[in-house]
Image (cartoon, rainbow, N blue to C red):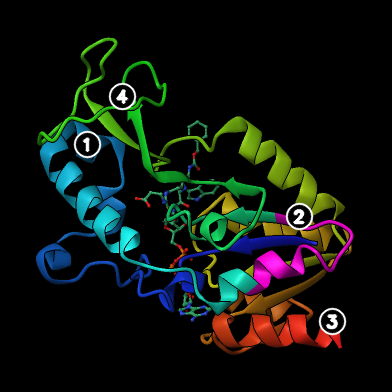
């Protein structure tokens, strides 16, 4: 199996999805504008305020039944490759052993010049790289940036090699992640979507489970264990 998850699987953990992530203070910003190298270049302080706000939300969140069911599912099939677009780390906290973070991780701090991930304990508006002094940035993949090569290669290979591809909690609008389902279909995998709001791409899928991941995934696991 190859599984792709999006923000929808964390919605039941009260982590706002990308499309409704803008609440209150952030209502006037478009995430597609903010999650870019240009926005960081223009106003690193604003970006750090946004990411710190998102880190607080995620730190207060707990994995939900959907995350736990996926961790259990991995033990019920010969091989399950979990690819997530999410940067919240909730799959790992639910016990999923190997998670491919297609868009990086919210809690990693990365040097904006050297690219390396660094530890620091600076409580300043814009933390600086302890090695070269450049601005640190969150270790996520922004729009217009390449997907980490290893994540890209492993995910493409898993999508091409799986018997079943599950697309869970994603609007399937962001590429190249959204293209994984097409790769699976081109390699004759059975493709299914789990989403309370059926996406336009699901018309080409074999199965659509119109429901919340936190309800559908535990039922799926239950059906495999009886
Ligand atoms: C790149 C990290 C090239 C940052 C994010 C074609 C091919 C390649 C690229 C492109 C292309 N066309 C356009 C592009 C460019 C762009 C793109 O896709 N733009 C879109 C807007 C059209 N892609 C890129 O820029 C990518 N890079 O292509 O690089 C390149 C190559 C070489 C060298 C240089 C460059 C990089 C994209 C990564 C962007 N980073 N996140 C951060 O988080 O701050 S994207 C971010 O938004 C998320 O990670 C996620 O991927 C996306 C949001 O999507 P979803 O997860 O689906 O969330 P959404 O809110 O949309 O939907 C939630 C769904 O859940 C809904 O359907 C809802 O119904 C459902 N739901 C709700 N509740 C539940 C539920 N489902 C189940 N259960 C529930 N309870």
Of tags 2 and 1, the one toward the viewer is 1
Q: Whole-percent x and y of residue 181?
A: 70, 62
**Are circles 4 and 1 on residues that touch, CB within 8 Å?**
yes
**Are circles 3 and 1 on residues that touch, CB within 8 Å?**
no
Task: Name which of mark 2 and mark 1 comes first in the sequence.
Answer: 1
Residue for point 26% across, 10% down: 132
Tag 4's secondary structure? Answer: loop
Task: Name which of mark 2 and mark 3 comes first in the sequence.
Answer: 2
The quadrant of the rendering that contains the C terminus is bottom right
| Left or right of 5 in this view: 165 | right
User: Residue beneath label 1, please?
Assistant: 40
Range of residues picked out in magenta: 69-81
Q: Whole-percent x and y of residue 127?
A: 18, 29
Task: Name which of mark 3 and mark 1 comes first in the sequence.
Answer: 1
Crowd around label 4: few <14 · some 14–19 · many ≥20 (10 Å): many
| Left or right of 204 in this view: 7 | left
């Amino acid at each position: 199996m190859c599984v792709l998850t999006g923000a929808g699987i964390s919605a039941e953990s009260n982590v706002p999805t990308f499309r409704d992530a803008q609440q209150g203070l952030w209502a006037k910003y478009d995430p597609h504008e903010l999650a870019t190298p240009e926005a960081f270049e223009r106003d690193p302080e604003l970006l750090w305020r946004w990411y710190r706000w998102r880190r607080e939300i995620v730190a207060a969140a707990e994995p939900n039944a959907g995350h736990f069911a996926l961790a259990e599912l991995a033990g019920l099939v010969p091989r399950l490759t979990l690819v997530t677009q999410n940067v919240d780390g909730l799959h790992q906290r639910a016990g999923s052993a190997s998670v491919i973070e297609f868009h990086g991780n919210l809690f990693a701090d990365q040097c904006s010049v050297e690219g390396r991930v660094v530890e620091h304990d600076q409580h300043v508006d814009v933390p600086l790289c302890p090695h070269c002094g450049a601005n640190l940035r969150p270790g996520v993949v922004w729009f217009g940036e390449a997907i980490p090569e290893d994540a890209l290669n492993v995910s493409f290979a898993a999508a091409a090699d799986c018997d079943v591809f599950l697309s869970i909690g994603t609007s399937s609008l962001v590429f190249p992640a959204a293209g994984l389902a097409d790769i699976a279909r081109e390699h004759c995998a059975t493709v299914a979507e789990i989403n309370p709001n059926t996406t336009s791409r699901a018309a080409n899928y074999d199965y659509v489970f119109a429901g919340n991941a936190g309800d559908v995934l535990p039922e799926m696991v239950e059906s495999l264990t009886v």
